Image: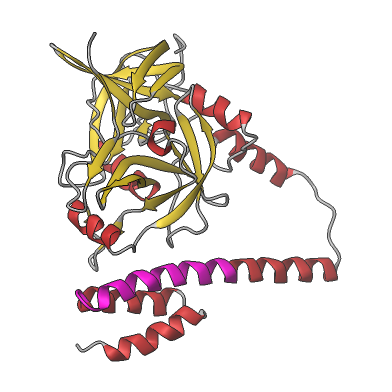
Amino acid sequence: MRPYYFATTAVVGLTFAALAPAQRPAPAATLSGKEIFQRTLKSVTWIVQQVDAVGGRVRLMTGSGSLIDVPQRLVLTNYHVVGQAKKVAVFFPQFDKNKQLVSDKEYYFNLLRGKSGSIEGEVIARSPKQDLALIRLPVLPHGTTPVRLARESVGPGDTVHSIGNPGASGALWAYTPGSVKAVYRKKWAVSDAEERILRFEAQVIETTSPVNAGDSGGPLLNSAGELVAVTQGGVLDTQGTISFFIDLSEVQNFLKANKIRTTNSPAAAEATTLADTKTEPKADAKTTEAASKSAEASEAEKQEKAAEQKLRWAKDLIKDQPSKARDRLEEIIKTYAKTKAAEEAKELLKTIKK
């Protein structure tokens, strides 16, 4: 039997050692790998959960995920990434003052050790059979964008792109190109990190792009940068590695079964456009004013929560990285000027020496 591996990483100790149809229309646009990476980057997450603690050493499982809906703050990943955990830590990519990606894994491990920089997400749905799960976040970083679900999947010969967080690499948010070898129904059973037997059955996409431990749950994208599958795992073979991804059709069925309707799919976009073309009765002045005030209050609350999250991150940097802390505080003051967090940021800024 060829050894099967999950594209999920077990990390031990606080030193954190590694963790189709025959005829389909082409995607709406054909983008370069670089364009797809840049467009999708802010949608991809690093997911961490504490499995147990033995002898005072923390044991973690890490994987990847995709933000698929901003209003509902939903992150799609694998079941085997979250297991039975109720809550997991979710990291979004961070950027330096030059707006360049901070990909150094040790940087994020330091945030993890300091219990900062992550957002605690709640696992709201899981399918052990399809190896899929959904995480809902209480807040999102400012400017975060979702990855769009494709209208349909891919087939043999199509170019695909994946982004994940390989445990063996010193970097997070790594890009890998490839092409589709086959799409088919598959049943398989494997042991997880807890030596439990997990049995899966799903439509899978097999590709030439290798997946590594830690990539699990990340997106597989078509040439338009749309999600067509979720990274799952692979089989080690004497002639190489066979990589598997959970097909888009399984994602669609999973969302439907859990009564989740995203605002980020082609069907949803069409429904919105159709609704906009219909003539709606005009609301009276009082109703319009009340709706406007409600929307403003909701937006103000979102801004406040986002600013508070940024402020916590900035505070964690004041002692060891005052320059970065200053940049973060200035960003809060500029971006969230009307929040209480911005006022606190102004006071903290006075305490940092230039």
Residue 237, given in percent of the width and then of the height, sits at 18, 13
> Which portion, as a residue range, is magenta?
300-321
Residue at the spot 50% in from the left edge and 59% down from the top edge: 139
* Vertical position of residue 244 compared to residue 99: above or below: above
Q: How is the image coloured?
A: secondary structure
Residue nearer the viewer, 247 or 272: 247
* Vertical position of residue 271 compared to residue 196: above or below: below
Residue at the spot 46% in from the left edge and 75% down from the top edge: 336
Asked if the magenta segment contains residue 209, the reply would be no
Question: Is residue 263 in view from this perspective?
Answer: yes
- Give the quarter of the image for residue 334: bottom left
Name of the residue lying farthest toward the front = 55
Q: Quadrant of the N terminus?
A: top left
* Vertical position of residue 343 compared to residue 296: above or below: below
Residue at the spot 22% in from the left edge and 11% down from the top edge: 2
Q: Quadrant of the C terminus?
A: bottom left
- Give the quarter of the image for residue 238: top left
Residue 226, given in percent of the width and then of the height, sits at 42, 34
